[in-house]
């Protein structure tokens, strides 16, 4: 690990050891090393291929439910072969380590892939819903992990409606229970870490600023610079799958 990155990780490990309430915001970059395409990477990102801003909206689903549900079922099938990476495992271990010393670490994820839970994370808030849950457009009732691929697009629900993915589309409100949990973490954290996110999708993009305004220590771990890189106390340029294990090692060393 290069010297500047190592120094940043050492500083963040120190903050972790003295923090009592930690909030970690994660985005698509956290799952990139698991093979899940992010929204912005030119070669693999879905912005280039499918323009999520166009497809990830209620309007697109209303206009063309077949294309939208095919896209989400394709992503769901892709996810089936994706496993948590060392970054997910290290973060789940940091959560357990925090709990063992009487502090608390909450993961606020923008990802809909379920990989934090798959890695053993427990205190995880899915801000943008989950691709594993599909919801009836008529009754709002949810179906967890419906068999894929669907045999028709758009898939019909058993209650006479259509099935839509249980994710938050652009222009939709975040789930109230997720908002409540995120607000509680933001209001009480003394350390806020943003990891693997472009910090451009709201309201999550504003979390670092809000934590800093309350006096929490702030840090970012990201491959590329983002709009919050200049705002946080510690900005670590790196891959979460490599930085998180090193952070765990330094933070938990006796
Ligand atoms: C809402 C589910 C009320 C669907 C997603 C204020 C200002 C401006 C706009 C708005 C605003 N308030 C609301 C908006 C509108 C909108 C918005 O933010 N638009 C953006 C485009 C400007 N927000 C909303 O509509 C939200 N709803 O606020 O309701 C409202 C509504 C309208 C108007 C006002 C208020 C709902 C947003 C949720 C949308 N749903 N996902 C699906 O998955 O299909 S968001 C979607 O984008 C994913 O969740 C994904 O996570 C996210 C993209 O962001 P990132 O996660 O950061 O991923 P990205 O690819 O962008 O970046 C990856 C990063 O990782 C990069 O920086 C890269 O360098 C880094 N990286 C890559 N590999 C690695 C790595 N880092 C480390 N290690 C690596 N290995």
Image (cartoon, helix red, strand yellow):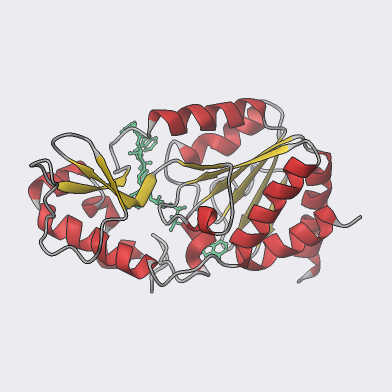
Relative to 97, residue 243 above or below: below
Residue 15: quadrant of the picture: top right
The picture places residue 108, in percent across and down from the top left corner, at 53, 42
**Residue depicted at x 38% and y 33%:** 175
Relative to 124, residue 132 above or below: below
Q: How many marks?
A: 0
Question: In this view of the protein, which residue sits in the foreground, 90 or 61?
Answer: 90
Quadrant in which the C terminus appears: bottom right
Question: In this view of the protein, which residue sits in the foreground, 149 or 51?
Answer: 149
The picture places residue 112, in percent across and down from the top left corner, at 40, 52
The picture places residue 45, in percent across and down from the top left corner, at 38, 66
Instruction: Tell me if residue 239 can be seen.
Output: no
**Residue depicted at x 57% and y 67%:** 85
The picture places residue 237, in percent across and down from the top left corner, at 65, 61
Quadrant in which the N terminus appears: bottom right
Question: In this view of the protein, which residue sits in the foreground, 166 or 220?
Answer: 166
Residue 74: quadrant of the picture: bottom left
Toward the front, the furthest residue is 158
**Residue depicted at x 10% and y 62%:** 152
Toward the right, the furthest residue is 254
Instruction: Tell me if residue 116 can be seen.
Output: yes
Relative to 205, residue 94 above or below: below
């Amino acid at each position: 690990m290069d010297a500047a990155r190592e120094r940043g990780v050492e500083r963040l490990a120190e903050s972790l050891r003295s923090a009592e309430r930690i909030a970690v915001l994660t985005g698509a970059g956290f799952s990139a090393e698991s093979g899940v395409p992010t929204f912005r990477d030119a070669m693999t990102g879905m912005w280039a291929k499918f323009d999520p801003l166009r497809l990830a909206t209620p309007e697109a689903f209303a206009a063309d439910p077949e294309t939208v549900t095919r896209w989400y079922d394709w992503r769901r099938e892709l996810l089936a072969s994706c496993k948590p990476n060392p970054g997910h495992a290290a973060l789940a271990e940091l959560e357990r380590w925090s709990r063992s010393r009487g502090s608390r670490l909450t993961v606020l994820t923008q990802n809909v892939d379920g990989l934090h839970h798959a890695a053993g994370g427990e205190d995880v808030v899915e801000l943008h819903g989950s691709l594993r849950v599909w919801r009836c457009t008529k009754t709002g009732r949810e179906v967890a992990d419906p068999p894929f691929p669907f045999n028709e697009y758009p898939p019909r629900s058993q209650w006479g409606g259509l099935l839509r993915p249980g994710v938050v589309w652009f222009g939709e409100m975040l789930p109230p229970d997720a908002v409540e949990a995120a607000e509680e973490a933001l209001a009480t954290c003394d350390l806020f870490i943003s990891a693997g996110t472009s910090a451009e999708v709201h309201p999550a993009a504003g979390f670092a600023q809000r934590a800093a305004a309350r006096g929490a220590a702030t840090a970012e771990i990201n491959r590329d610079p983002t709009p919050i890189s200049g705002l946080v106390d510690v900005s670590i340029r790196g891959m979460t799958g490599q930085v998180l294990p090193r952070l765990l090692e330094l933070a938990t060393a006796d």
